């Protein structure tokens, strides 16, 4: 026999609900079951059950929890996806790391909740994780429904701000401090036309945290290096959302009006077109003829980029990328010392 005290020394977190089920089953036979010392808990992914009392009491207690033991083992394995009670079980549960990698690769916005500190004896240990996608927990657990529900509720605001946060969740046995870390897809930057400026812009955008796409329907203009990057040739293939940016680097391209019109109908936050008023003006007139208002056209940055005196293709690409980054962070892109250019 192993005493309850010895069992408690081994287990990492209690499962008080299962112990209470055993005690309740015993009370149906004898009031002395109120003194039951049965213990249930877990060590890692192993469930530990210390059955109380006599042989008869042990059998009654085991029968009381037998039906839900498969579900308890599923939870310990990290499969905590919420769903109907009669839903088919998941045959293989992926690890938190695998699930996170898969969902990030698919461009999902997810939050990883990690227990970083506990107080008291809550049903959670430091290091336990829960992965949240949208309004559902998709992998892992923080140890109990109260903690999981708290993280699920707070994940929405973390995704909205894009900033990590720390929250404390309470349980009758103690509390847990949880770090909520958002994992967001890279912002999309669509670079129109395979030009020298466009190629530098794609390369440097990838190095500064953008998902850069080179848009060029004229296949003969694409080099082997261009084809090695992500390319697109149809506007409908561009998944433009609120934090997307797009820049035209060839004002003579035959598809400028068509694609800028599509950009204006999208929620993209930044639309830029290279070129002087003389070169871009006819395109704006064509867009007005299609019904776009002056307010619509005001979304277009042209000439595009910060004024750094750019002359070469590299300098122009740098100017444009700096402007896109400044816009992303809602900054003007001026000098940090507020002195401007000292001509003397």
Image (cartoon, rainbow, N blue to C red):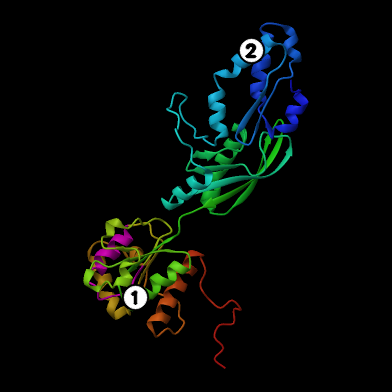
Which element type, helix, strand or loop, lies under badge 1? Answer: loop
- Figure quadrant of the C terminus: bottom right
Q: Is residue 194 left or right of residue 182?
A: left
Q: Label 1: few (<14), some or many (≥20) within 10 Å?
A: many
Check if residue 314 falls in the magenta segment.
Answer: no
Which of labels 2 and 1 is toward the front? 2
Q: Label 2: few (<14), some or many (≥20) within 10 Å?
A: some
Any mark on residue 128, and which? Answer: none
Which residue reaches farthest front? Answer: 1
Q: In terms of image quadrants, where is residue 336?
A: bottom right
Which residue reaches farthest top? Answer: 29
Query: Residue, x 44% and y 64% (percent of image)?
Result: 210
Residue 48 % position (x, y): 65, 27
What residue is disc 2 on?
Answer: 59
Residue 84 % position (x, y): 45, 27
Foreground pick, 196 / 278 = 196
What residue is disc 1 on?
Answer: 274
Mark 2 or mark 1: name the one nearer the start of the chain: 2
- Figure quadrant of the N terminus: top right
Relative vertical location of residue 225 with respect to residue 314 in this rendering, above or below: above
Magenta region: 247-265
Query: Residue, x 68% and y 33% (percent of image)?
Result: 13
Residue 139 % position (x, y): 51, 40
Foreground pick, 332 / 150 = 150
Q: Is residue 4 left or right of residue 207?
A: right
Foreground pick, 13 / 219 = 13
Q: In terms of image quadrants, where is residue 306?
A: bottom left
Query: Residue, x 60% and y 35% (percent of image)?
Result: 45
Check if residue 252 falls in the magenta segment.
Answer: yes
Q: How many marks?
A: 2
- Rounded to the nearest angstrom, the CA distance separating label 2 from label 1 is 79 Å
Residue 62 % position (x, y): 62, 16
């Amino acid at each position: 026999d192993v005493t309850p005290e010895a069992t408690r020394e081994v287990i990492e977190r209690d499962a008080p609900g299962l112990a209470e089920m055993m005690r309740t089953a015993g009370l149906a036979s004898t009031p002395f079951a109120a003194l039951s010392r049965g213990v249930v808990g877990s060590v890692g992914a192993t469930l530990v059950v210390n059955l109380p009392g006599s042989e008869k009491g042990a059998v009654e207690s085991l029968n009381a929890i037998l039906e839900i033991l498969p579900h308890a083992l599923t939870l310990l394995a990290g499969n905590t996806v919420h769903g109907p009670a009669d839903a088919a079980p998941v045959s293989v549960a992926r690890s938190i790391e695998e699930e996170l990698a898969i969902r990030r690769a698919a461009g999902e916005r997810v939050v990883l909740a990690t227990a970083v500190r506990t107080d008291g004896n809550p049903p959670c240990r430091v290091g336990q994780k829960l992965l949240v996608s949208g309004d559902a927990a998709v992998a892992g657990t923080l140890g109990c429904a109260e903690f999981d529900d708290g993280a699920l509720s707070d994940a929405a605001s973390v995704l909205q701000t894009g900033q990590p946060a720390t929250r404390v969740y309470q349980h009758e046995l103690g509390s847990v401090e949880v770090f909520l870390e958002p994992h967001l897809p890279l912002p999309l930057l669509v670079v129109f036309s395979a030009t020298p400026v466009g190629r530098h812009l794609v390369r440097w955008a990838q190095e500064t945290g953008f998902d850069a796409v080179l848009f060029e329907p004229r296949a003969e203009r694409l080099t082997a290096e261009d084809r090695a990057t992500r390319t697109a040739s149809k506007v409908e293939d561009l998944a433009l959302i609120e934090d997307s940016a797009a820049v035209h680097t060839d004002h003579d391209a035959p598809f400028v009006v068509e694609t800028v019109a599509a950009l204006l109908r999208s929620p993209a936050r930044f639309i830029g077109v290279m070129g002087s008023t003389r070169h871009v003006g006819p395109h704006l007139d064509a867009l007005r003829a299609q019904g776009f208002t002056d307010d619509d056209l005001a979304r277009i940055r042209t000439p595009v980029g910060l004024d750094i005196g750019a002359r070469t293709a590299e300098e122009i690409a740098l100017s444009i990328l700096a402007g896109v980054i400044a816009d992303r962070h809602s900054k003007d892109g001026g000098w940090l010392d507020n002195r401007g250019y000292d001509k003397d």
